[in-house]
Amino acid sequence: MDESALDIESVLDADFSIDVSFTTTLPATLTAGFTFSPVTVTTESTEVTTTAGATDTDVLTSVVVAPGLSLSYVQYEEEAWSLRFEPNAIALSNYTLSGYTDADGSLKLGLKDYGVNVVLADRVAGEVTEHATGDFAIPGNMILGASYDLDVSGVKGLVAGAFKFEDASNNRVTVEGEVTEVPVPGELSADVAFGLLNFLDDSDAASSATAYRVYAAYKYPYEMEDITVTPHVGLTWQNNLKTVYAEESSNDLMVIYYGDDSAWADTQEVKAGVDVSYLATPMTVDLTDTLTIDLSEVSSPVFALDLTPTVEYAISDLSVAGIEVPVEVADLTEFASTLSMTPHGYITYGMAEVPVTLGADVYYFFEDGEQVDNPIAYTANVSYALNDYMSAGAHLGNEVLDAYGYLVGAAELTELHWYLYLKAEFEF
């Protein structure tokens, strides 16, 4: 409930369900997994035009609430290998066969004693056409991938490859290697990928495109009593991924929900920094920093800096106060015009006598060398725990959130908003 009274948008969200997973073990080593949803809500909408020339809009025309049972997997195991079917893609790696790829069914052969997996994924399962065409052809719209779990002399990782086939003129080959653990002090991670895509261009002429990615990162924390110093370096060099892996990049949830395509964008950069953490109870002081050198234009590299100092004080076991100052400089050569920072002070106060928690936050926005129109955002919260499962509370503030719920600015104080809420959480 807020200043516009009760907000009841729908009785049930369209994706509301309660899932209970279980596995049925059949004779020998054949197992199957199912997901039972006691409540599954499906909706159907119809596109209508309200007035002549108006933009078409979807109108909810039906809501069906019914239980549902779906197959999660079927697997047959022997001592050294397993054969597994899943009605979706099984991830080998990001660029071979992954959750980013649209696939309606996949079959996996795993050699457990040797760390080898072979996967065949069908990207259009259920589309049946006549097979007696008189022409010989490789089945289209499939991906064949294989991976090997690397574990040699303390070096652990993955080597993978895949062949994606739509038709004779549209196919892709990918090889990739990842290192997740090496027998050296500190933490090292690295991966290398190469992809070759064959396709028909706009004039139906045979064409091809290549993509590559080279990534490496290393950090080593030095611990000295109350102080921890962590130097870190990184390298990212990638090109043409969004062309060769168009399907995967368009299905990446970071791209869909947050508009963040940095994992796929052309990048040539080196990063380095030294993070410092100081703990002297009840005080904690942290400093994280990263200097990024963008080498996309070798003749004029761009130097950027991300810096966040944080100071936090534990008032009690239930209460804490702190301040953080994220600072971003997009180009150090133009420091004054590319400086952005958002100081954020916060306090959370819990009462031991009663189950009440108070909270307050203050943000200040300074972007691209200038104070924004409404630079200060205030929020205040109070919550009361009715029991271990239910709580009620209130919120007051002038903060502005983006479509994904992140605080990105402030409104005028005359636009102060508030709401009350009742929340229940159950886990079983």
Image: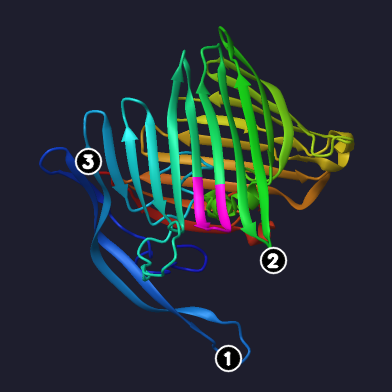
Quadrant position of residue 416: bottom right
Q: At numbered mark 1, what does the secondary structure look like: helix, strand or loop?
A: loop
Near mark 1 (Cα within 10 A), the count class, few <14, some 14-19 or many ≥20, is few
Q: Amino acid at mark 1?
A: Thr
Q: At numbered mark 3, what does the secondary structure look like: helix, strand or loop?
A: strand
In-front residue for pair 418/333: 333
Left or right: where 261 falls relative to 37: right
In-front residue for pair 257/389: 257
Q: Amino acid at mark 3?
A: Tyr
Residue 394: x, y in percent? 47, 52
Q: At numbered mark 2, what does the secondary structure look like: helix, strand or loop?
A: loop
Residue 345: x, y in percent? 63, 36
* Residue that badge 3 annotates: 76
Quadrant position of residue 317: top left
Left or right: where 1 falls relative to 227: left
- Residue at the (32%, 48%) spot, across then down: 425
Q: Main secondary structure of the magenta part?
A: strand
Q: Which mark is residue 202?
A: 2
* Residue that badge 1 annotates: 51
How far is mark 1 from mark 3, CA to CA? 58 Å
Residue 8: x, y in percent? 41, 68
Near mark 2 (Cα within 10 A), the count class, few <14, some 14-19 or many ≥20, is few
Left or right: where 206 falls relative to 336: left
Vertical comparison of 138 with 295: above or below: below
Vertical comparison of 28 with 1: above or below: above
- Residue at the (23%, 51%) spot, across then down: 34
| Residue interval drawn in magenta | 163-172
Q: Which mark is residue 273?
A: none
Quadrant position of residue 52: bottom right
How far is mark 1 from mark 2, CA to CA? 38 Å
